[in-house]
Amino acid sequence: MEQVKIGIIGGSGLYEMSELKDRIEGAVETPFGPPSDKFVVGTLRGRRVAFLARHGRGHRILPGELNFRANIYAMKMLGVERILSASAVGSLREELAPQEVVLPDQFVDRTYNRVSTFFGDGLAAHIAFADPVCPDLLEQVFRASQKVGIKTVKGGTYVCMEGPAFSTRAESNLYRKWGMDVIGMTNLQEAKLAREAEICYVTMALVTDYDCWHDSHESVTVDMIVGNLIQNSKNAQALIVQTVEDLADKRNCGCGDALRNALITDRSAIPAGTKAKLQHIVGKYLTKPQA
């Protein structure tokens, strides 16, 4: 498929971009298997972008079933340098109301059944992940939110749970005591893999409801949630469109060199099969002499 620099991952409620023009749809095969769905490459405000529905069109894939490695590796194969990710979340704070947007800059991992690294099979690497979200891209999304008038909170902590069931009330209250802000089931793995792939990554966490800690939890209905998802989808699309329009052509962050000092294994000891499998991620480092 065509090479593009901007990738978009749509979560619950965001299965396509209505403004995307001149569309080309195609499957991308990766060494890690198939991504969630076919990619749609098209033009958004004059920029070519690649869109992927995280859970597949029709929402067929559970969070724990997602092939995160295939999704991010496919983005890398397409030449993507920045990923704008939209995701439905629950709020763990009174002041973060449904239909608001949070741009988390931290994650806490509460999953236990996920693969969240490309490495292994004879190649060890340890990326720096203290700041898991690209600060430049986060700032650009926040500026876009101010332009389009969507209430957005810059910064916060996203706790990533295993699912697919939602939290117990005890868990929800525990996360609040820990100081977490929103809760979801998907974005931690994407952020880790994007960093390993040297792709800038930001999450637009779209609040659909208060988690079960809130007194209003019992009055939440499916109709309310669906209504919030619909409005959140509109907000996400407006945010993405404005961000894409405003993005500079070149990156000014360090995400593109995240692996520079992360590869530990002696180059001569890396199995040929692993080198081939990870060519799109580590190839530029394996063609240079080891320092």
Image (cartoon, rainbow, N blue to C red):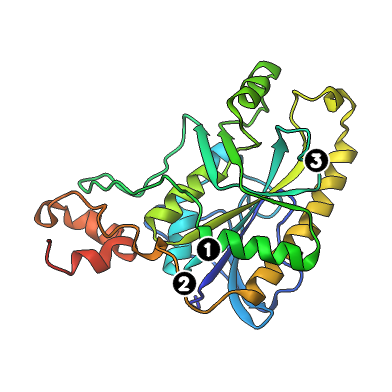
Looking at the image, is 212 positioned above or below residue 123? above
Q: Residues within 10 Å of mark 3 (few under 14, many from 20)?
A: some
Mark 1 falls on what kind of element? helix
- Say which residue label 1 marks: 136
Contact (Cβ within 8 Å) of mark 3 with mark 2: no
- Residue at 75 percent across and 23 percent down: it is 213
Q: Is residue 280 left or right of residue 47?
A: left
Earlier residue among tags 1 and 3: 3
Q: Residue furthest top?
A: 170
Earlier residue among tags 2 and 1: 1
Q: Residue type at mark 3?
A: Ala
Q: Position of residue 242 (x, y in %)?
A: 70, 71
Q: Position of residue 7 (x, y in %)?
A: 56, 66
Contact (Cβ within 8 Å) of mark 2 with mark 1: yes
Looking at the image, is 88 positioned above or below residue 22? above
Q: Name the image quarter holding residue 8.
A: bottom right
- Say which residue label 3 marks: 97
- Say which residue label 2 marks: 251
Earlier residue among tags 3 and 2: 3
Q: Position of residue 270 (x, y in %)?
A: 16, 53
Mark 3 falls on what kind of element? loop
- Residue at 63 percent across and 53 percent down: it is 56
Mark 2 falls on what kind of element? loop
Q: Is residue 250 left or right of residue 145?
A: left
Cα separation, mark 3 vs mark 2, equals 33 Å
Cα separation, mark 1 vs mark 3, equals 26 Å
